Amino acid sequence: MEVMSDPVILSSGHTFDRTSIQRWLDSGNRTCPVTNLPSPLTPPSSPTTPSAIPRISRHLPSFRRQLIESGAASAVLRLVPHEDLAEAALKVVLDLSLDGDDARVGLVAEGAVATLVEALDGKSPAARALAATALTSLAVVEVNKATIGAHRPSAIGRLVGMLRCGGGRERREAATALYTLCSFAGNRVRAVEAGAVKEIYGLVGGGGGLDRAVEVLGLLGRCKEGRDQMEGIGGFVRVLVGVLREGSARAVEHALGALVSVCTYSDRLRLDACREGVLEACLELVGDENAKIAKNALKLIKTLQR
């Protein structure tokens, strides 16, 4: 373990003066004085290395603030297109985005959306998942939802593509990003036009799970374009009935919401729901200890009995 110039930055993100670290090493210690884990010392000149940047940004809020306030975030964003640096840079972008709404707005102003959208099409599955997660974080701010949704090339379209072609983690992160973006009403039609209804139906119907994907369906059912596509899919109600019987609490809650949306406006789907045993399932769910499930089940019963 080599001591570099003052100050000495440990891999844990803590900073010590050189004299203290020298005494620590002279005593035979080869671990971090904070965590007691084996920890190489990192010189101040090397926080830009791929391994150091995410580690320091994760543990040092002051370092993150410096990156944002100094405008250095744009330099980090420029590293994302480089395959060998993409994951490290995306981890830093994600860490920066978690520092609050001002940081999120600042990153968007620095051009983060364009960078992240391009990263959704990258070669590394891990980098694609990180890009989707970072978009989710940026979209916590309402104005950013609109900015991301309107971006061309389409962020929403690429997230839908990840649902279709991605691995497990990519699909989960893409579904979460779509859910966050589609909580803004203006993005729902964009998601429908990008094929989200069909892809989510295929995932859920094929046993792909993804509770968050069912939640996205619940949101898309709130717009006419989404309901029209759901009505045009054969067996749509049957798939959601399967969720009611076997899904998690959150999936059941949102499957009920999607059924309320489509059955309110479609006589055919209302009849399909009755034939598939939705009414009986709802009668069991009105007594559920989860208040949201009970409320949605009661609402669906009233819709089916109209």
Image (cartoon, rainbow, N blue to C red):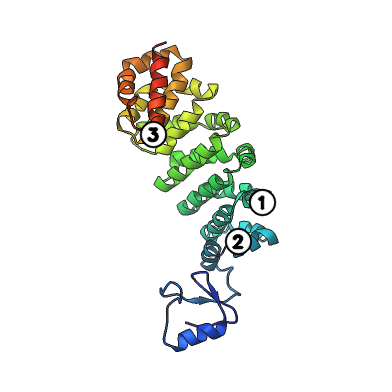
Query: Circle 1 is placed at which residue position?
Result: 106
Quadrant in which the C terminus is drawn: top left
Residue 46 is situated, as x and y percent measured from the top left of the image, at 58, 73
Q: In the image shown, does 159 or 6 lie closer to the viewer?
A: 6
Q: Residue at x 33, y 18 (%)?
A: 279
Query: Circle 2 is placed at which residue position?
Result: 64
> As shown in the figure, which amino acid type bears the numbered disc 1?
Gly
Q: With 73 as the anchor, is 195 left or right in this view?
A: left
Query: Circle 3 is placed at which residue position?
Result: 251
> As shown in the figure, which amino acid type bears the numbered disc 2?
Arg
Distance between the Cα atoms at labels 2 and 3? 36 Å
Q: Please rate how many residues cluster around mark 3, counting C-alpha atoms within 10 Å: few if below 14, some from 14 to 19, many from 20.
A: many
Distance between the Cα atoms at labels 1 and 3? 34 Å
Above or below, 95 relative to 26: above
Above or below, 33 relative to 280: below
Q: Please rate how many residues cluster around mark 2, counting C-alpha atoms within 10 Å: few if below 14, some from 14 to 19, many from 20.
A: many
